[in-house]
Amino acid sequence: MLKYTVISGSHRKVSQSAKIAKVVEKLILKENPSDDVGVIELANNPLPLWDEGVFHKDAKWTALWTPYSEALKASDAIVVVSPEWGGMVPPGLKNFFLLCGNLELGHKPGLIITVSAATGGAYPVAELRMGSYKNNHFCYIPDHVIVRNANNILNDLDNPTADDDRIRVRISYSLAVLKEYAMALRAVRNSPVINFKDFANGM
Ligand SMILES: Cc1cc2nc3c(=O)[nH]c(=O)nc-3n(C[C@H](O)[C@H](O)[C@H](O)COP(=O)(O)O)c2cc1C
C-alpha cells in the first residue's frame, strides 16, 4: 500500500487547482483502491509566512505545522498542483516549501501538475524544478502535466469531452510513473548512504 499527498497550491477559496487536485485523488484511488490519498489545500492561506520561530520550534509553529508535517512524513509520493500566477508559483506554495524539511520530502518522488486558465503553466514547472527542492531533497520525476484552459477541463469525469480524455490519459500515465518511483525510492530512503545529519542542506 502506498500513501499519497496531493497539495493544491492556490490561495483562492474556490480554485481550478483544487478541482484538479480532487481529480488526481479520484484517479489515484480508481487505479489503486487500497492506497491512501490525502489532499492538502492552501486555499485561504492556512499558514502564515515563515518567520524565525520556525528555527526555534515555537509552540505556534508546532501547532500549525504538525498536522501537515505528519501527513507528509507518512507519504510515499507527493503531487504538487500549482496554478500559474503572474508567471509564478503562488507565494503560499513557496512558503509551504520553506517549511518542509528532509523528513517530510527527502528522497520522495514528486509529480508537478500546473494549472492555467489560458495557455500558461510552463513557468511554475520551471520554478518548482529550480527552486523548491534544495534543502528538503524532494525528487521531482521527469514527467509533469500542464492543464491549460482549466475552466473548461475535467469538470465532469463521468461525461468526459475529447479534451478531458487527452489530459486524463496524461495525468494517469504520470501517476503510474510516480507510483514506480514511489516504490523504488523507498530503497533509497532506507539506504545507509542517506545522511541528513551531516548533509541536511543541499548546495
Ligand atoms: C493573481 C493571479 C495571477 C495570474 N496570473 C496568471 C499567469 O501569469 N498566467 C496564467 O496562465 N494564468 C494566470 N492567472 C489565471 C490562472 O491561470 C487561473 O486563475 C487558473 O484558474 C489557475 O489558478 P487557480 O488554481 O487559482 O484557479 C492568474 C490568476 C491570478 C489569481
Image (cartoon, rainbow, N blue to C red):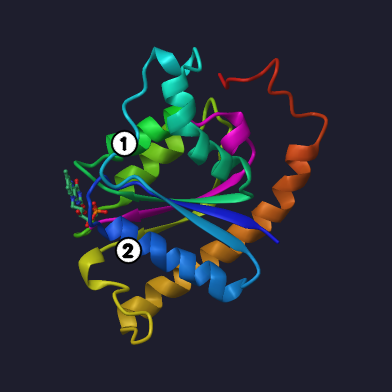
Q: Earlier in the sequence, mark 2 or mark 1?
A: 2
Residue 182, x across and y down, in percent: 66, 53
* Location of residue 195 (image quadrant): top right
Q: Nearer the viewer, residue 61 or 43?
A: 61
Q: Give the residue type that dot 2 points to.
A: Lys
Residue pictured at 66% horizontal, 58% vertical: 2
**Mark 2 vs ligand 1: CB under 8 Å?**
yes
Q: Is residue 167 magenta?
A: no
Q: Is residue 107 magenta?
A: yes
The crowd level at tag 1 (other Cα within 10 Å; few <14, some 14-19, many 20+) is many
Mark 2 lies on residue? 19
Q: Nearer the viewer, residue 53 or 60?
A: 60
Name the side, left or right, on which 177 lies relative to 151: right
Is any atom of residue 149 visible in this view?
no
Q: Nearer the viewer, residue 188 or 43?
A: 43
Is any atom of residue 116 visible in this view?
yes
The crowd level at tag 2 (other Cα within 10 Å; few <14, some 14-19, many 20+) is some
Residue 75, x across and y down, in percent: 61, 48
Start-end of magenta stretch:
100-116
Q: Give the residue type that dot 1 points to.
A: Gly
Residue 97, x across and y down, in percent: 44, 33
Name the side, left or right, on which 63 lies relative to 126: right
- 188 lies above or below 4: above
Q: Nearer the viewer, residue 141 or 13?
A: 13
Mark 1 lies on residue? 92
Q: How many numbered marks, from 0 up?
A: 2
Residue pictured at 50% horizontal, 31% vertical: 100
- 51 lies above or below 182: above
For the residues marked 2 and 1, what is the alpha-carbon distance in whole angstroms?
18 Å
Q: Quadrant of the C terminus?
A: top right
Q: Residue furthest bottom?
A: 159
